[in-house]
Amino acid sequence: MNKFIVAIAILFSVLCSSCITNKDVVYLQDKGTIVNDSLHLKDMGKPYRVQINDILSINIKSTDSELAKLVAIFNPTERIGNVNGQETLYYDGFTVDLHGNIEFPILGKINVLGYTTDEINAKVKQALLDKYLKDVSQIFITVKLAGLRYTVSGEVESTGVLTLYQDRVNIIEALANAGDIKDTGDRTDILVVRQYPQGQKIHHIDLTDMAAMQSPYYYIQSNDMILVKPLKRKSLGAGQTATQTLTTIASIFSVLVSTYFLAKNL
C-alpha cells in the first residue's frame, strides 16, 4: 500500500508541475535582461528594404492632362470582375525576381533589392527622366509594398498564409492576426524561417522576454514563416489549468484505487 501511495504522490507532482503558468503565456516580461530603449527606438526608425519575392505597387500620375495620357502606359490595367485585392496585386504588381529586379513597362529592368520605397521612387523618376521624359516636375509617383505576406503554422488559432497591408509589422502583431498563440504554444522559442539570396535560415526569438524587441527578427519580413512549437508539458496530457489538472488526477486516482482493491480482493 505504501508503494501505491508513493506512486500516486509522484504522479500528482508530475501533473501539477505540468500546469501552464502565467509566465508561459505573458509576452515581453521583465526577466532582468538589459534592454536599451535607444537601440529599440533606432531600430523602429529603420525603413523596410525590399526583398526577393516582394510585390510592389507602383503608380505614376500627372496633373497635366496631356502628360497624364502619356504616363498612363506605365500603370497596370485595372482588372474587372470577381478579383480580390491580393489577386490583383499578384497579376498587376511588380514582383521582385531572384536577381532583385522588377520588369517595368518600357523602362525595362530596374534593380530594387535592398532599396526603400522612397529610394525606388527616386530610381523610377530618374529612369523616366533619362529614357522617356524631359521633365518630371509634374509627375507624381507612388511606390508601396503590396502588403507583408507571411506564413504561420503550429500552435496558433489559425494557421495559413496571411497578408497585412502595413509597411512594418512586428511578430506579435503577425501572430495576433493569426488568432494568437494557443496556451499550449511555446512562446519562449518561436522559430522564424527567413529567406535570403543564398537560401533560408532559421532564427529563434523568445517572446516572453522584453529583450525580444531588440531582436532583428522582432519585425517580420515578406515571406517569413513563423513556426510555434507546442509546450513539452502538452505531451503529458495534463490540463492547461489547475482545475483541469486536478480533474485529471482525480480520475486517474479513482481508477487506480478501484484497480488496487479489486486486485487485493481476488
Image (cartoon, rainbow, N blue to C red):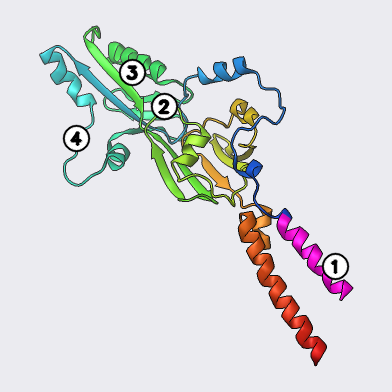
Would residue 129 appear left or right of 13 to someone viewing this image?
Answer: left
Q: Amino acid at mark 1?
A: Val
Residue 77 image offset from top left, x and y in percent: 19, 33
2 or 4: tag closer to the N-terminus: 4
Vertical comparison of 49 with 235: above or below:
above
Residue 251: x, y in percent?
A: 66, 71
Magenta part mainly helix, strand or loop?
A: helix
Q: Residue furthest bottom?
A: 266
User: SS for tag 1?
Assistant: helix
Earlier sequence position, callout 3 versus callout 2: 3
Residue at image x 55%, y 17%? 41
Task: From the image, tell me which residue sits under label 4.
Answer: 78
Q: Is residue 132 visible?
A: no
The answer to if 68 sits in the magenta stretch is no
Q: Earlier in the sequence, mark 2 or mark 1?
A: 1
Q: Residues under labels 1 and 4: Cα distance?
A: 74 Å
Nearer-the-camera pick, 120 or 5: 5
Q: For marks 3 and 4, give the one nearer the viewer.
A: 4
Q: Report whether 157 appears left or right of 234.
A: left
Q: Which three-letter amino acid code belongs to the residue tagged 2? A: Asp
